[in-house]
Amino acid sequence: MRAVIQRVTASSVSVDGVVVGAIGVGLNIFLCAMQGDTERHAQILAEKITKLRIFADENGKMNRSVSDIGGAILLISQFTLAADIRKGNRPSFAAAADPQRANALYERFADLFRKMGVSQVETGVFGADMHVEIQNDGPVTIILDTCDWPVGER
């Protein structure tokens, strides 16, 4: 699984001009399920993101997680994170999971955050043409890819 995590002061996603998800302080996460991804990948990645210490503590150090600050998560599916541009100039998305599997993992991912106690979890609409507004804080942007992790962590 690939995820782009952004620390935000606010973020929202709209479909056809209607806001379908919005948060204040927390994380905006773009997620792509890749071929071969499993629920185990989703579990490990969700745990890592929930514990990711990228919010400031009382000394201004990045030492708190989204859970520590009572922050929210806006999760948005984005198959284009699977883009491969090694050949030519038109990206290939062949490495992305098929839509049915990707949607199941996306839904599971959102549920995992809820079960881990994240105070608010909002989502976009899987497969829709979405418009995202992000007030990136910092800016802080982290990219995680489970295929880059050691075998024991995958």
Image (cartoon, rainbow, N blue to C red):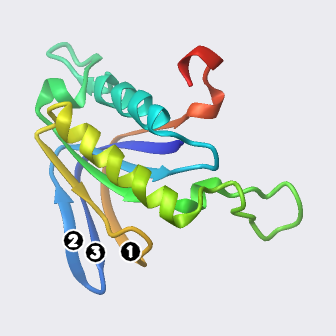
Residue pictured at 49% horizontal, 64% vertical = 100
Instruction: Give 17 or 153, whichever is nearer the viewer.
Output: 153
Look at the numbered discs 1 and 2 and tell me whether their residues touch, using CB distance below 8 Å.
yes
- Sequence-first tag of 1 and 2: 2
The spot of residue 126 in percent (x, y) is 39, 68
Circle 2 sits on which residue? 20
Residue pictured at 34% horizontal, 24% vertical = 52
Query: Which element type, helix, strand or loop, lies under badge 3?
Result: strand
Q: Is residue 96 left or right of residue 77?
A: right
Residue pictured at 88% horizontal, 66% vertical = 88
Q: Crowding near pointer 1: few (<14 within 10 Å), some, many (20+)?
A: many
Instruction: Give 76 or 107, whichever is nearer the viewer.
Output: 107
Look at the numbered discs 2 and 3 and tell me whether their residues touch, using CB distance below 8 Å.
yes
Gap between marks 1 and 2 measured at Cα = 9 Å
Gap between marks 2 and 3 measured at Cα = 5 Å
Instruction: Give 55 or 15, whichever is nearer the viewer.
Output: 15
Quadrant where the C terminus lies? top right
Circle 1 sits on which residue? 130
Which mark identifies residue 14?
A: 3
Q: Is residue 34 above or below residue 53?
A: below
Q: Kindly identify the amino acid type of the residue bearing the numbered disc 2.
A: Val
